Amino acid sequence: MNSTSNQLLQPTTSSTSDLSRRKRKTKSPPLVPPSPSTKWRSDKQQQIYTTKLARALTKLRIAQSSSSHSSPPHTGRAVREVADSALAVTARGKTRWSRAILSKAVNLKLRKHKRRRISNSVTSPAITTGSLRSKTQTATVTRVKAKGMPSVQRKVKALSRLVPGCRKQTLPVVLEETTDYIAAMEMQIRAMTAILSAVSSPTGHEGGQTHVLG
């Protein structure tokens, strides 16, 4: 009797194992997130960045027009900072380079406030000379250390200096951040070219400029 029951149970066990194997095989593959280049090349992402950049440029233009004419602003540098900040905001701080740009923008605002507060104070020339000497010595030591490094390590270090927030990161992190940063910069160039062409067009001086720059 026991042998008969065991024989009856064996097909059920084998069929259950076969079904489980089939389920494992028919499982859907995991969703692969889009690559950085694909994300930054999408029309939706470029439209989001273009909108943020146009608003930021409008605020910059209003701020520069309201500022005093005695101290003219550095327009090129200001536009660059605004474009990079808008790019970092579009990235939502999910990468190291975007977080570094956002933190740098905050630090620049704090420095401007401090400069306004201590505008009447005078810096002693001795402190300025000492700071210049320390910077020169640091640069010399850095060059000597760089000469003793292997060529690959020197290239990686130079690359990490070009990408914001990657100075002390490992090679995989630097490569990943560089790939995303280059794709974002290419999208930034496309967006700024589109804005420039819209403003420079004959209709841009009347309605187009208002549409692009608020």
Image (tube, rainbow, N blue to C red):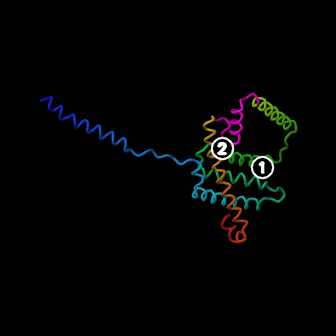
Residue furthest to the left? 1
Provide residue 47's location: percent of width, then percent of height: 60, 59
- Badge 1: few (under 14), some or many (20 or more) residues near its Cα, within 10 Å? few
**81 falls in the magenta region:** no
Provide residue 204's location: percent of width, then percent of height: 70, 69
Q: Is residue 37 above or below residue 10?
A: below
Relative depth, front residue between 131 and 92: 92
Residue at x-position 57% and y-position 51%: 38
Provide residue 92's location: percent of width, then percent of height: 59, 49
Relative depth, front residue between 89 and 173: 173
Task: Give the residue type at disc 2.
Answer: Ala
Provide residue 4's location: percent of width, then percent of height: 14, 31
Quarter holding the N terminus is top left
Instruction: Say what secondary structure mark 2 lies in.
Output: helix
Judging by the rendered image, the residue that carries numbered circle 2 is 100
Relative depth, front residue between 120 and 39: 39
Task: Give the residue type at disc 1.
Answer: Arg
The residue stretch that appears in magenta = 147-169
Is 160 placed left or right of 119 in the picture? left
Q: Which mark is residue 116?
A: 1
